[in-house]
Image: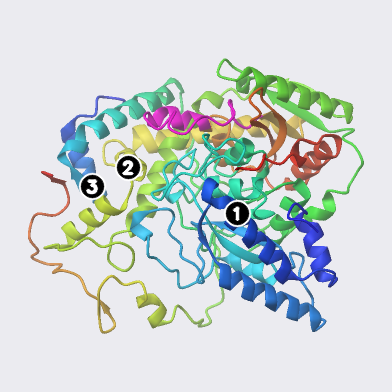
Amino acid sequence: MGELVDAERVRWIAVLSRIRLAEREIPTYAQELGRILSYVKQLDELDTRDVSPIVHPFSTSNMVRSDTPQSGLPRDAALANAPLLEGAFFRVPPVLGSAAGGAGVSSA
Amino acid sequence: MSEFSSARTIAEQVASGRIRALDVCEAALARIDALDNSIHAFLHVSREYALGRARQVDEHIAAGREAGILAGVPIALKDNICTSFAPTTCASRALADYRSPFDATVVERIERAGGVIVGKTNLDEFAMGSSTENSSVRPVRNPWQLERVPGGSSGGSAAAVAARMAPLALGSDTGGSVRLPASLCGVVGVKPTYGRVSRYGLVAYASSLDQIGPIATNTADAALLLEVIAGRDARDSTMCDESIEPFTASLADGADCRGLRIGVPSEYFGEGLAPDVRSAIEQALDVYRGLGATVSEVSLPHSRYCVASYYLIATAECSSNLARFDGVHYGRRAEPVSGMDELYARSRGEGLGAEVKRRIMLGTFALSAGYYDAYYDKASRVRRLIREDFDRAFDALDLLACPTSPTTAFPLGEKTGDPLQMYLADVHTTAANLAGIPAVSIPCGFDRDGLPIGMQLLARRFDESALLRAASLFESATEWHARIPPPAD
């Protein structure tokens, strides 16, 4: 934990995060993420083998409602902020067989 | 009736017909016009909408119908709370043109209670920050000294209330984002118990930590707003079962603090504490002793791990919550793009600011295969140790008291070069979010430069009543909260 974050790791994290970073930004992010990860390394000082993780702030049971139909968001409202529409569809580039140059790093 | 009247006074006067909601609204809008060019608290002022709402409130009252306990009160909302009548941008380029198709639950409740929403306030982008310098639009300035930060991430809401542009505001608090700006701006800010206020319509940052909270010039007003917005909502399944409490009524219980056991965590009084902050808190504790409370030292041994634990859990959760900003259904879309991967990556790359990207990447890393155990899971276990510190402390104590922030407002630009430095501004506030307990920051003095100092009180889960009562009693014995920033010329 807290190992140096190098450029390769930042590029990999950027792909996982689906965020395009410019090549020139990589060193700064590497340095900043490295510093933060070094800082959080202090959690290793604590023995937590017998401590269970907190998943929810307080104990609760699953909230359910009765199975009666309720109106949802009207279609026009749902489409109102669409960047690109085609009829009642959100228009996007091809999903299958799309060009490879996607997430990752540009040379800008 | 002046622009410095409390929300309660305004509501009473409007409900009784002595003043018009329309006049109150026009006065607030005029004050925003006069002051906000130098403070930048607002991203959007809903002028026509607010005036229309104010007229409706007046008509309602003239027709003899119930006015609501916030009748005619101008209220500002942090711009990560969804409104259908005004943009919701989260101070991000990704949402610069976004208009929500629905209102947040808190908005519905405010309007049902007669409140008049006057605009959306500036914030650190997606609520990520401690100074509001991460706003993609422009930073907010502290009304007390314009070259200083108001704190963050709810800096706009805190500044709006401090400058008396509106008597009430809502912010959101994930690691301190209501309490820290309240402290730096000299106003009252409450983070309710997790699960007390519906998050439906709050743009999610960290789902197990986020809470919407009121910001006001005094505790009774904060309690009033909390009473309106709190309570079970079927649309937020993370809410608690506790019924809405009459927070305002509980303020009147008891004339002093006899029997109140206040603990002071020694870990919050270390080297990083500014001397003027230390002495203000010590004097505040003397006030509580004078009111009959007992004050004793207590230890929260895992305090030093709070920031680390927070910045792993919050970033992990935000990496998931912000995945929706992909340019597909709403928000900024990059073009031209040749495929979906490029659409996602460039839309997010162009739309999201540096701090947001930093946190998403940190969180993604903390959750990734091979690292999940060492980072996110580890932090979640430490979170339990932190919570247990509070459980133990509250065995023999009713409240904990400490500085909200180790310093007063710092100059704009001082901490923007080092993200970690900025994260450490949250050293006193993240614990309450991690433990899910309620906390309030109240004004308790000023430093030698005239900058506000805030005292933080923390209570057991669901014990907002003890918190607010103690805060209110402190106000009755002091006048810090009544001070107003000098006019910004």
The label shown at residue A16 is: 3
* Numbered range of the magenta stretch: B403-425
- Chain of the residue where label 1 is placed in the rendered structure: B
User: B157 left or right of B282?
Assistant: left
Magenta stretch: residue B424 in it?
yes
Q: Nearest to the eye among marks 2 and 1: give it.
A: 1
Q: Dot 3, how many residues are within 10 Å of its Cα: few (below 14), some (14-19), or many (20+)?
A: some
Are the residues under badges 2 and 1 in a single subunit? yes
Q: How far across and down, in percent of the image, does residue A106 sit?
A: 13, 46
Under circle 3, the secondary element is: helix
Going by the picture, which residue comes out furthest to the top? B271
In the picture of the structure, the residue carrying the numbered disc 1 is: B34
In the picture of the structure, the residue carrying the numbered disc 2 is: B354
Residue type of the residue flagged with mark 1: Ala
Q: Quadrant of residue A7?
A: top left
Whether the residues at callouts 3 and 1 have beta carbons within 8 Å, the answer is no
Q: Dot 2, how many residues are within 10 Å of its Cα: few (below 14), some (14-19), or many (20+)?
A: some
Residue B47 position (above or below residue B278):
below
Residue A20 position (above or below residue B1):
above
CA separation in Å, label 2 and label 1: 32 Å
Q: How far across and down, in percent of the image, does residue B23 sit?
A: 72, 68
